[in-house]
Image: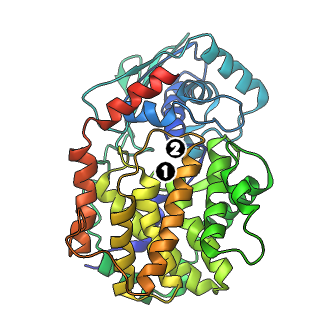
């Protein structure tokens, strides 16, 4: 049976407000807090090292605070779990003040829990009505456990695979079938991607218009000009969106495989390149679908949370494939772009979500355009070059082995450094 790529995209491309790790913490707390009617006096968090690493230094939308404690308090005292990863949207000023005071008073202790998946959040909320507990694991929205005063509640769906967090059955994707799909699919079936284009462009525009974080994208755009280089323009647009998002801009993004920055890096380079190159809507939608699906395919190999930077190792690989398609490249040249990217950016690590992510995204997007330009000129890294294999699927699998086995202790080392800097 043919892989249902439309279903995969609609499953993995989701709206999210703020960094998805604090958002998932807020969501777990919102599930537990709602059982206590949001009358929460104390919260205990037990999280994986990856969750703490990715949420330690990132801005929380609508506040001037950083970190998962603020997100937890907001979710527990005011979050509506039905909003999913937009759980922090619509919280009024009075509720924010009450929640942030709880966090500032030290009522949200955090412990790293060993021996769990890389994506693991356990929230215990306490109040006059007793104790409520929620566990999210494997996938940012996967409620695996919910209880009130020790009595488990139904309605949970624990449908993840232990190592990596993808749905248990996997997707059965490969680069060749993805390319066939995006080349042949009736264009009307990709119309849902138009919403993604609008949402991502809005936050990029915000990042270009105002000072957020390091202002990487805005400053780079100052040097682009009307006739500036394609790579410079695409890089500035994408980095600007990351600047805004990491600084807590209260605008949503579309995430890819649970990461908002991956969602930006998989979409905005293709969107901006199509705009700069004067491409039509159909060309953009097909190239965007290619980028999003290649990103999902690579992430299925390396896992949802990894010591490797997902924006560089997955999303920019996808966007390079999409840009190559916009440049007129065929399947062989798209494979060359993917192989070039794996040879180029596979060493970029993830040291948490923060302002500096805009720099890594800028680096990866610049590389994506460079590798596309080389690919359409039929220049590609030699076969069996380092971790690059003659078979593109083997190269993608090697990325997964690198992240899961070769860098097994990396996350702990990085987190230790980050905690020393805190």
Helix, strand or loop status at disc 1: loop
Give the percent coordinates (x, y) of residue 390: 20, 75
Q: Examine the image and state in which quarter residue 67 appears.
A: top right
Q: Is residue 400 above or below residue 186?
A: above
Structural distance between the alpha carbons of marks 1 and 2: 6 Å
Q: Are marks 1 and 2 in contact (CB under 8 Å)?
A: yes
Is residue 410 found left or right of 244 in the rendered image? left
Give the percent coordinates (x, y) of residue 336: 35, 79
**Mark sitting on residue 259:** 1
Q: Examine the image and state in which quarter residue 203 appears.
A: bottom right
Is residue 168 found left or right of 359 in the rendered image? left
Badge 1, how many Cα within 10 Å: few under 14, some, many 20+?
Answer: many
Give the percent coordinates (x, y) of residue 191: 58, 77
Position of the N terminus, as image quadrant, is bottom left
- The residue lying at 58 percent from left, 17 percent from top is 40
- The residue lying at 24 percent from left, 70 percent from top is 393
> Which residue corresponds to mark 2?
20
Is residue 182 found left or right of 342 in the rendered image? right
**Mark sitting on residue 235:** none
Residue 397 visible to the viewer: yes
Helix, strand or loop status at disc 2: helix
Q: Is residue 155 above or below residue 194?
A: above
Is residue 383 found left or right of 83 in the rendered image? left
- The residue lying at 47 percent from left, 38 percent from top is 352
Earlier residue among tags 1 and 2: 2
């Amino acid at each position: 049976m043919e892989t249902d790529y439309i279903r995969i995209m609609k499953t993995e491309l989701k709206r999210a407000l703020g960094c998805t790790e604090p958002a998932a913490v807020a969501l777990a707390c919102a599930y537990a807090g709602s059982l206590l009617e949001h009358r929460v006096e104390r919260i205990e968090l037990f999280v994986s090292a990856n969750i703490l690493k990715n949420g330690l230094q990132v801005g929380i939308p609508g506040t001037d605070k950083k970190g998962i404690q603020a997100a937890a308090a907001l979710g527990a005292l005011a979050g509506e779990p039905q909003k999913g990863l937009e759980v922090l949207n619509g919280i009024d000023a009075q509720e924010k003040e009450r929640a942030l005071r709880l966090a500032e008073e030290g009522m949200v202790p955090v412990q790293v829990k060993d021996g769990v998946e890389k994506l693991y959040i356990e929230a215990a909320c306490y109040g006059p009505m007793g104790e409520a507990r929620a566990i999210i694991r494997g996938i940012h929205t996967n409620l695996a456990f919910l209880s009130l005063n020790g009595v488990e509640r139904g309605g949970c769906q624990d449908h993840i695979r232990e190592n990596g967090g993808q749905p248990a059955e996997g997707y059965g994707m490969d680069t060749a079938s993805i390319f066939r799909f995006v080349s042949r699919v009736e264009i009307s079936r990709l119309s849902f991607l138009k919403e993604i284009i609008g949402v991502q462009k809005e936050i990029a525009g915000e990042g270009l218009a105002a000072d957020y974080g390091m202002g990487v994208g805005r400053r780079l755009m100052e040097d682009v000009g009307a006739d500036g280089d394609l790579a410079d323009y695409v890089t500035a647009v994408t980095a600007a969106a990351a600047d805004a998002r990491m600084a807590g801009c209260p605008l949503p993004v579309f995430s890819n495989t649970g990461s908002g920055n991956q969602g930006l890096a998989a979409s905005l380079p293709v969107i901006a390149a199509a705009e700069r190159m004067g491409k039509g809507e159909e060309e953009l939608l097909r190239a965007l679908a290619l980028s999003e699906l290649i990103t999902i395919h690579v992430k299925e190999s390396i896992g949802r949370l990894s010591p490797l930077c997902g924006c560089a190792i997955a999303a920019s690989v996808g966007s390079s494939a999409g840009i190559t398609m916009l440049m007129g490249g065929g399947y062989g040249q798209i494979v060359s772009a993917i192989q070039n990217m794996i040879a180029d950016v596979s060493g970029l690590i993830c040291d948490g979500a923060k302002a500096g992510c805009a720099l890594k995204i800028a680096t990866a997007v610049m590389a994506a355009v460079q590798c596309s330009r080389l690919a359409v000129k039929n220049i590609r890294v030699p076969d069996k070059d380092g971790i690059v294999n003659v078979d593109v699927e083997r190269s993608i699998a090697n990325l997964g082995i690198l992240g899961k086995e070769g860098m097994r202790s990396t996350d702990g080392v990085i987190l230790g450094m980050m905690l020393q800097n805190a």
